[in-house]
Amino acid sequence: MSAYFLCLVLFCVGLYCILRKRNLIKIIIGLAIIEYAVNLFFVLAGYRIHGRAPILAADQEIVNMVDPLVQAIVLTAIVIGLATTALIVAIAIRIYDKYGTFDITRINKLKG
């Protein structure tokens, strides 16, 4: 149960970075922290104590296996998260080239 609480704390730290920070790089890091918190929550949801790998042989019973669907979802989420993070960083670099700053309050004041 404490691991779920730590996932919530990690999610709240990332949400704080997004809502309160004014630097684009810090906002991107906050998004990554939220992504890691959600992935960790999914892994914990599929975990079982003394669980075994989800590999089934012909003479084995299905007893106390971890959920393989959660592992596939997390792997897919990692790939999608990496692609979106790369896109956001590329957009942040273009904004820095145009305005010369990562501060979103100064970017909002500029026209053009």
Image: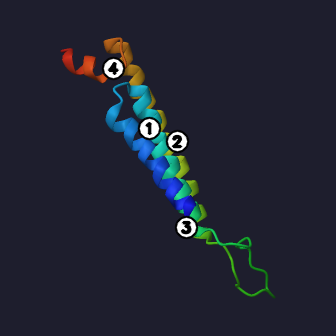
The residue at the point 69 percent across, 72 percent down is: 49
Within 10 angstroms of label 4, few (less than 14), some, or many (20 or more) residues? Answer: some
Circle 4 SS class: loop
Residue 45 is marked as 3
Circle 1 SS class: helix
- Marks 2 and 4, Cα distance to the nearest angstrom? 23 Å
Q: Earlier in the sequence, mark 1 or mark 4?
A: 1
- Marks 1 and 4, Cα distance to the nearest angstrom? 15 Å
Farthest residue in the top direction?
A: 100
Cβ–Cβ under 8 Å for marks 2 and 1: no
Within 10 angstroms of label 3, few (less than 14), some, or many (20 or more) residues? Answer: few
- Marks 2 and 1, Cα distance to the nearest angstrom? 14 Å
Q: Which residue is mark 4?
A: 103
- Marks 1 and 3, Cα distance to the nearest angstrom? 23 Å
User: Compared to 111, does 75 lie above or below?
Assistant: below
- Marks 3 and 2, Cα distance to the nearest angstrom? 22 Å
Residue 30 is marked as 1
Q: Which residue is mark 2?
A: 82
Q: Earlier in the sequence, mark 3 or mark 2?
A: 3
Q: Earlier in the sequence, mark 4 or mark 3?
A: 3
Residue 19 in the image: state x and y as whole percent: 32, 37
Farthest residue in the right direction?
A: 59
- Marks 4 and 3, Cα distance to the nearest angstrom? 38 Å
